[in-house]
């Protein structure tokens, strides 16, 4: 048996131009998808941050009213790019007809803000006791 010392015939080692183009196309598609996912995540993070600020504002406005006057509350305002409206309505319960029962008011707070081209809103509602006047008509 003898080994030939001549050049090895067959396919040359390395990548062809077509293989390189296919690899670049696959990489471009993958990077495009990654860019899109990252952009969506950033957008959703911004939306959640805006909603979180709206929730904190609604909770702080609600905390300002531990009791509600008998005539109710109607208020509007704007704070740091968020517009808000607060209103109360009597909340009917079976105990409302009893003289010593606490009457309730439903406080509803609606916060609105602009998120890019979209208008967003958040509504928070809670029940608060109605402030009863003291004997003699004083609050």
Image (cartoon, grey):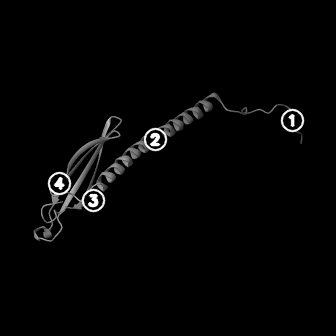
- In-image side of 15 versus 50 (left or right): right
| As drawn, 101 above or below 21 | below
Q: Quadrant of the N terminus?
A: top right
Residue at which label 4 appears: 72
Q: Earlier in the sequence, mark 4 or mark 1?
A: 1
- Crowd rating for badge 2 (residues with CA inside 10 Å; few <14, some 14–19, many 20+): few
Q: Earlier in the sequence, mark 1 or mark 3?
A: 1
Residue at which label 2 appears: 42
Q: Quadrant of the C terminus?
A: bottom left
Q: Residue at x 87, y 34 (%)?
A: 5
- In-image side of 113 versus 33 (left or right): left
Q: Are marks 4 and 1 in contact (CB under 8 Å)?
A: no
Q: Alpha-carbon distance for marks 1 and 3?
A: 99 Å
Residue at which label 3 appears: 66
Residue lying furthest front in this view?
136
Mark 4 secondary-structure assignment = loop
- Residue 61 placed where, x, y %? 30, 51
Q: Alpha-carbon distance for marks 2 and 4?
A: 42 Å
- In-image side of 6 versus 71 (left or right): right
Q: Alpha-carbon distance for marks 4 and 1?
A: 104 Å
Q: Examine the image and state in which quarter residue 47 appears.
A: top left
- Residue 115 placed where, x, y %? 35, 38
Relative to the observer, which residue lies in front, 14 or 30?
A: 30
Relative to the observer, which residue lies in front, 85 or 16?
A: 85
Q: Earlier in the sequence, mark 2 or mark 3?
A: 2
Q: Alpha-carbon distance for marks 2 and 3?
A: 38 Å
Residue at which label 1 appears: 4
Q: Residue at x 23, y 55 (%)?
A: 107
| As drawn, 102 above or below 5 | below
Q: Residue at x 65, y 30 (%)?
A: 16
């Amino acid at each position: 048996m003898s080994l030939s010392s001549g050049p090895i015939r067959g396919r040359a080692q390395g990548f062809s131009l077509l293989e390189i183009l296919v690899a670049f196309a696959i990489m471009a598609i993958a990077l495009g998808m990654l860019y899109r996912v990252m952009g969506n995540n950033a957008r959703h993070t911004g939306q959640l941050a805006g909603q979180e600020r709206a929730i904190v504002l609604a909770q702080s406005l609600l905390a300002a009213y531990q009791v509600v006057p008998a005539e109710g509350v109607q208020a509007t305002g704007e704070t740091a790019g968020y517009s808000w409206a607060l209103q109360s309505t009597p909340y009917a319960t079976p105990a409302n007809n009893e003289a010593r029962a606490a009457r309730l008011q439903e406080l509803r707070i609606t916060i609105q803000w602009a998120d890019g081209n979209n208008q967003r809103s958040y509504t928070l509602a809670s029940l608060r006791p109605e402030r009863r006047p003291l004997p003699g008509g004083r609050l």
